[in-house]
Image (cartoon, grey):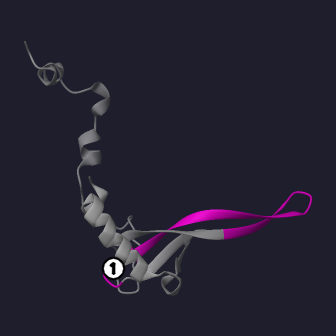
């Protein structure tokens, strides 16, 4: 009995797959791809939890409200500067982040789940 994959291979490429291989094949970034660079010129970051931002606004009728929003903290792996993306701007929040607590949590999480959180 033929395998399922053999049957798929015998059927040939899907008619809508034209150009798909080219789209998913890794390539070097070109001049149209921009990376956020840390002050140390690093572009590699680790997730370091969230911060809450409070955003005041005025509703129709002059009603004032505040919305709490969660923003991901990114830590540069090269120099440990911390950044938050909000309102189309990257903010340096290094002084507000407890990196000792973050590093302790990273060690505990890696011990419990393995590197990268994989079980």
Q: Quadrant of residue 41?
A: bottom left
Relative to 9, residue 91 above or below: below
Q: Which residue is outermost to the right?
A: 61
Image quadrant where one finds the N terminus: top left
Residue shown at 24% from the left, 58% from the top: 27
Whether 100 is among the magenta residues is: no
Label 1 sits on a secondary structure element that is loop
Residue shown at 15% from the left, 25% from the top: 5
Picture coordinates of residue 22, whole percent (x, y): 25, 46
Residue 113 is left or right of residue 47, and the answer is: left
Q: 115 or 81: nearer the eye?
A: 115
Relative to 100, residue 10 above or below: above
Picture coordinates of residue 21, whole percent (x, y): 24, 42
Picture coordinates of residue 110, whole percent (x, y): 28, 65
**How many residues crowd mark 1 within 10 Å: few (<14), some (14–19), many (20+)?**
some
Whether 55 is among the magenta residues is: yes
Residue 30 seen in this snapshot: no
Residue 70 is left or right of residue 64, and the answer is: left
Q: Quadrant of residue 35?
A: bottom left
Picture coordinates of residue 24, whole percent (x, y): 27, 47
- The residue labelled by disc 1 is 42
Q: 118 or 44: nearer the eye?
A: 118
Relative to 65, residue 95 above or below: below
Relative to 45, residue 80 above or below: below
Q: 54 or 92: nearer the eye?
A: 54
Q: Would you say the magenta stretch is mainly helix, strand or loop? A: strand
Span colored in magenta = 54-79
Residue 77 is left or right of residue 9, and the answer is: right
């Amino acid at each position: 009995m033929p395998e399922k994959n053999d049957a798929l291979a015998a059927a040939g490429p899907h008619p809508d797959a034209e150009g798909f291989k080219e789209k998913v094949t890794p390539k070097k970034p070109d001049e149209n791809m921009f990376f956020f660079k840390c002050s140390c010129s690093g572009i590699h970051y680790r997730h370091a939890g969230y911060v809450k931002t409070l955003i005041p606004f005025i509703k129709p009728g002059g009603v004032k409200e505040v919305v709490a929003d969660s923003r991901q903290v990114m830590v540069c792996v090269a120099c440990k500067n911390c950044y938050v993306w909000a309102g189309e701007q990257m903010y340096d929040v290094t002084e507000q982040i407890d990196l000792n607590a973050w590093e302790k949590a990273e060690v505990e999480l890696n011990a419990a789940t393995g590197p990268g959180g994989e079980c």
